């Protein structure tokens, strides 16, 4: 995402995302726009600016989660839910990455906060916000931004015996409003790139087939959720037991329960699965935990479960996570970063042109701060080197023996984690 936004800012074309000067339409552009705006506002292109939209989006999500839990269960539940979400492993992890999951989660959170105000409290203005947020969720990451909040909304309406509301003109008009948020960008892109329709269709439908990237078994999230939602998922069974004993809290839990259940059904139906796909469900878990534990404290259900105990536990978890993020993680995972080896390659290349031979690594391109033609066969590489003898070539060691590279010196070779690069200079001194 960081490199797409950099190219967007450099080219001035904010309509069609590009990665390494090639059109990239696998995802809508809203998250790219946010990072590009961050670059422009901060006046620099670096990791901090790239990650800032995710961090700010995560902070806003925590505040909305606390607000929703507070409205459903009470102020103490809101404080607990916000603190638990902020210290949930997968949520904190994605809040620090320049990826689309944190923006997606923000708009899903906003949508369901607005849904509660619009449908449970029957506010027409908040219903408009709900449908607008669903559209923005789609523009952040596509189909999950629509399906997850709509599944949650439909589940709650059915649970409340209000399922017929989806057939009312006001609801159908809201769906039209969502479409009006989504369709303009797609319409403009299809006019410029008619072939994009096939990309959009493949990106959506392929995830349901055996050919989906990151294909995993149906039970994948049954064993991933307990790991990725640590540590507070461990308290969820206690929270659910407390919710079942309190009629008020049990009914208030319907919305986050429908959110969690509907989201899991949707994600499980996809053949392609990854741990970070669970991030939009983290607020629902935190709200359920906050509400249930608040009910348990109010009823003194378990002597050991007190607000003082939970405050100390949250503070301990936060301190441990802060220590890990600031001290341990940089040392444990520095060897996997593309920054050092690709920045060194950029230093050696200088301002000279570059091509990529069987090499397409967006983090590396970001640290190179340049784009170059991607060549996928030896014939194309030979023609490119004849046409531009002054060009540098970046490839992998596995393809460094290409006949087209004979007569060129290997100026640099390095490895970082599973990433390997080989850099070839133009003929003559490098």
Image (spheres, grey):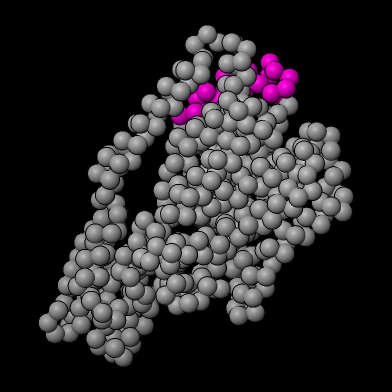
Chief SS of the magenta region: helix
Task: Judge from the rendering whether residue 108 lies leftward or rightward of residue 415; answer left or right.
Answer: right
Residue placed farthest to the top in the image?
303
Task: Judge from the rendering whether residue 201 lies leftward or rightward of residue 314; answer left or right.
Answer: right
Question: What is the quadrant of residue 361 in the picture?
Answer: bottom left
The residue lying at 34 percent from left, 74 percent from top is 370
The one of 25 and 318 positioned closer to us in this rendering: 318
Task: For the N terminus, give its image quadrant.
Answer: bottom left
The residue lying at 48 percent from left, 21 percent from top is 310
Residue 301, percent across and down?
A: 59, 11
Question: What is the quadrant of residue 246 in the picture?
Answer: top right
Residue placed farthest to the bottom in the image?
387
The residue lying at 71 percent from left, 40 percent from top is 116
| Above/below status of 238 relative to 277 | above
| Above/below status of 38 relative to 168 | below
The range drawn in magenta is 231-250
Residue 300, percent across and down?
A: 59, 10
């Amino acid at each position: 995402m960081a490199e797409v936004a950099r190219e967007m800012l450099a080219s001035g074309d904010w309509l069609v995302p590009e990665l390494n000067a090639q059109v990239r339409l696998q995802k809508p552009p809203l998250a790219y726009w946010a990072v590009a705006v961050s670059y422009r506002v901060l006046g620099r292109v670096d990791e901090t600016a790239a990650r800032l939209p995710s961090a700010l989006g995560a902070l806003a999500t925590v505040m909305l989660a606390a607000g929703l839990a507070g409205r459903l269960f009470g102020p103490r539940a809101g404080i607990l839910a916000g603190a638990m979400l902020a210290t949930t492993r997968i949520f904190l992890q994605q809040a620090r990455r320049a990826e689309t999951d944190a923006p997606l989660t923000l708009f899903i959170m906003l949508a369901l906060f607005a849904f509660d105000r619009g449908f449970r409290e029957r506010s027409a203005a908040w219903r408009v916000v709900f449908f607008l947020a669903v559209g923005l969720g789609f523009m952040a990451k596509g189909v999950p931004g629509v399906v997850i909040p709509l599944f949650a909304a439909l589940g709650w309406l059915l649970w409340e015996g209000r399922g017929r509301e989806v057939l009312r003109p006001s609801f159908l008009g809201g769906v039209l409003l969502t479409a009006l948020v989504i369709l303009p960008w797609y319409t403009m892109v299809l006019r410029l790139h008619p072939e994009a329709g096939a990309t959009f269709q493949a990106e959506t439908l392929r995830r349901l087939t055996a050919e989906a990237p990151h294909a995993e078994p149906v039970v994948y999230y049954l064993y991933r959720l307990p790991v990725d939602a640590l540590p507070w998922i461990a308290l969820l069974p206690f929270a659910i037991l407390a919710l079942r004993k309190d009629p008020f809290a049990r009914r208030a839990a319907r919305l986050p329960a429908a959110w969690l259940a509907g989201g899991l059904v949707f994600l499980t139906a996809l053949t392609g699965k990854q741990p970070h796909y669970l991030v939009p469900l983290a607020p629902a878990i935190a709200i359920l935990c906050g509400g249930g534990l608040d009910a348990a404290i109010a009823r003194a259900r378990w002597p050991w479960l007190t607000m003082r105990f939970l405050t100390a536990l949250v503070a301990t978890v936060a301190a441990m996570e802060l220590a890990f993020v600031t001290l341990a993680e940089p040392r444990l995972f520095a060897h996997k970063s593309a920054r050092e080896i690709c920045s060194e390659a950029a230093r050696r290349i200088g301002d000279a042109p570059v091509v990529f031979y069987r090499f397409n690594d967006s983090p590396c391109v970001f640290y190179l701060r340049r784009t170059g033609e991607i060549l996928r066969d030896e014939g194309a590489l030979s023609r490119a080197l004849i046409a531009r003898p002054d060009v540098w070539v970046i490839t992998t060691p596995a393809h460094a023996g290409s006949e087209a590279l004979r007569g060129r010196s290997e100026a640099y070779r390095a490895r970082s984690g599973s990433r390997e690069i080989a850099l070839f200079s133009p003929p003559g001194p490098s």
